[in-house]
Image: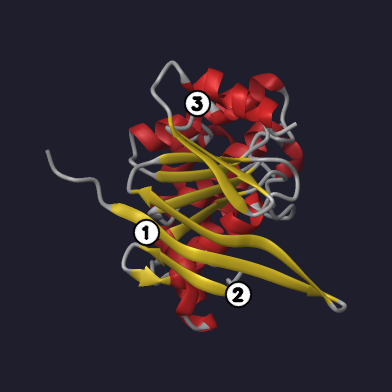
Amino acid sequence: MSAVTPLIRIDSLVKQYTRDTQVLTVLDKLSLTVDEGDFVALMGPSGSGKTTLLNLIAGIDRPTSGRIVVGDQEVSSMSEGALAKWRSANIGFIFQLYNLVPVLTAFENVELPLLLTNMNRARRKKQAELALSVVGLTDRMDHYPRQLSGGQEQRVAIARAIATDPKLLVADEPTGDLDAKSGEEILVLMERLNSEFKKTIVIVTHDPKAASRAHRLVHLDKGVLKEDVHAERGKAVGMAAAVSVSST
């Protein structure tokens, strides 16, 4: 059996912010490895450093010290220009509030990140339509965000995230603004992206139901990794609930 290759390697990660004369340590010497093809849920109370860690992995923010390697790139040491180019090719972002451009159609929103690539117009069209078909919205591609439900907007946002075929999807509370039915549809879609399309996914969530879809639960508290559980299918719901209860 061949060994699974780590996609993300984090070593002694520290993130601090200075507020007036006070230094706030959000992440404190955190080390973590995420294998290629894994589905990881980051849980913990508000202020535990979950979103900060997600942003650092995605290259949106920079660490105070420590190393972050994604694939064969040391993200923590890249220049701003190289980092922007790397993000556009390797990271798909999924946000709680969708972040769609209201004056663009679903198709145009999905095509947006492809405009930063060297794809020609025909290739961009094919890629955007393929992404919309994966999320089941080919019949809504000419609709504007205001004409879509919340669940449909989030599916457009997911289509936009996968349009460039990135190695890694990062999601910050992707079901947090949805009703139960729409949230369930998004979670099923994310499971499919992981199992069928082999996307590595790191998700921040407070919801045990969302976390239960992950293969692994990582619990943070005050910037420190408190628990790292590799879930067996069928047991993940109980473990996610247990982690949620322990954080309250």
Q: Please provide percent x and percent y for residue 80.
A: 54, 81
State the CA–CA distance, disc 1 to disc 3. Answer: 28 Å
Instruction: Name the residue tied to disc 1.
Output: 123
First-in-chain label (1 vs 3): 1
User: Can you tell which mark lies on residue 98?
Assistant: none
What amino acid is labelled 2 in the image? Thr
Instruction: Name the residue tied to disc 3.
Output: 188
Secondary structure at badge 3 equals: helix
177 over 22 or under it: above or below: above
Q: Please provide percent x and percent y for residue 131.
A: 45, 44
Instruction: Name the residue tied to disc 2.
Output: 64
The reply to whether residue 86 is visible in this rendering is yes
Of residue 158 and residue 86, the one placed in the foreground of this image is 86
Q: Quadrant of the N terminus?
A: top left
Q: Please provide percent x and percent y for residue 153.
A: 66, 39
Of residue 4 and residue 192, the one placed in the foreground of this image is 4
Classify residue 143 as left or right of residue 93.
Answer: right
Q: Please provide percent x and percent y for residue 50.
A: 63, 50
Query: Which residue occupies 53% across, 65% down?
Result: 13
Query: Which residue occupies 58% across, 71% down?
Result: 63
What amino acid is labelled 3 in the image? Val
